[in-house]
Image: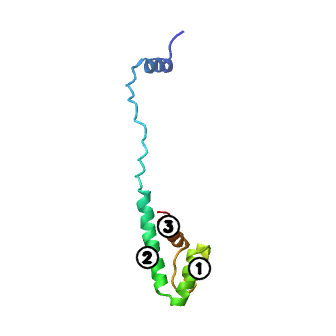
Amino acid sequence: MSETPKTRARRTRAAKPQPAVEPQPEAVEPAEPEVDQEAVERAEETEAKGKLQAAIDGMTDTIRRAFVRHLEGETSAEYLSDWLERYGTPVSASSIRAYRRAQSRREGM
C-alpha cells in the first residue's frame, strides 16, 4: 500500500516533537481584605448616635421624654424611623437599631 500525501503529513506531524507545555499557574482569587468588624460597628454606632442625637436635640422636652421612652422600650425601629421622618428629621431604622445595640453593649459592661 502506498502512502498518500495526506497520510504522510499526518505521520510526520505526529512524529515531530511537540514543544513542552509549561504548566500555567492556577488563577488565584484576590484575597478579601480583612475587615475590622469592631471598627465598622463603632463607626455605625457613632453615625447612628449623631443622627439620632440631632433629632432628639430638635425636640421639645415633652416630645423628647416620650420619644426616649419609646426608643429605650420595645417600639420597633421602623415605627420610630417613620415617626421621625414624618416630623422632618429622617433617621433610618438601621441607625436606631445600631444605637440600641451600642446601648445594650454599654449596659452589659
- Which of the two labelled residues, at mark 1 and mark 2, occupies the earlier sequence position? 2
Which residue: 58% across, 73% down? Answer: 77
Say what amino acid the circle numbered 3 marks: Glu
User: Mark 1 touching mark 2, by CB under 8 A?
Assistant: no
Say what amino acid the circle numbered 2 marks: Gly
Residue at mark 1 to residue at mark 3: CA–CA distance: 27 Å
Which residue: 61% across, 77% down? Answer: 79
- Which of the two labelled residues, at mark 1 and mark 3, occupies the earlier sequence position? 1
Which of labels 1 and 3 is toward the front? 3
Q: Which mark is residue 71?
A: none
Which residue: 54% across, 85% down? Answer: 65
Placement of 26 over or under 106, stated as above or below? above
Q: Position of residue 35 (x, y in %)?
A: 42, 55
Q: Is residue 83 left or right of residue 47?
A: right
Q: Position of residue 73 (x, y in %)?
A: 59, 74
- Which of the two labelled residues, at mark 2 and mark 3, occupies the earlier sequence position? 2
Which of labels 1 and 2 is toward the front? 2
The residue indicated by pointer 1 is 82
Q: Nearer the viewer, residue 86 or 53?
A: 53
Disc 3 secondary structure class: helix
Q: Quadrant of residue 18?
A: top left
Which of labels 2 and 3 is toward the front? 3
Q: Nearer the viewer, residue 16 or 29?
A: 29
Figure quadrant of the N terminus:
top right
Say what amino acid the circle numbered 1 marks: Asp
The residue indicated by pointer 2 is 50
Residue at mark 1 to residue at mark 2: CA–CA distance: 18 Å
Placement of 37 over or under 55, stated as above or below? above
Q: Position of residue 43 (x, y in %)?
A: 42, 66
Residue at mark 2 to residue at mark 3: CA–CA distance: 19 Å
Disc 2 secondary structure class: helix
Q: Quadrant of residue 41?
A: bottom left
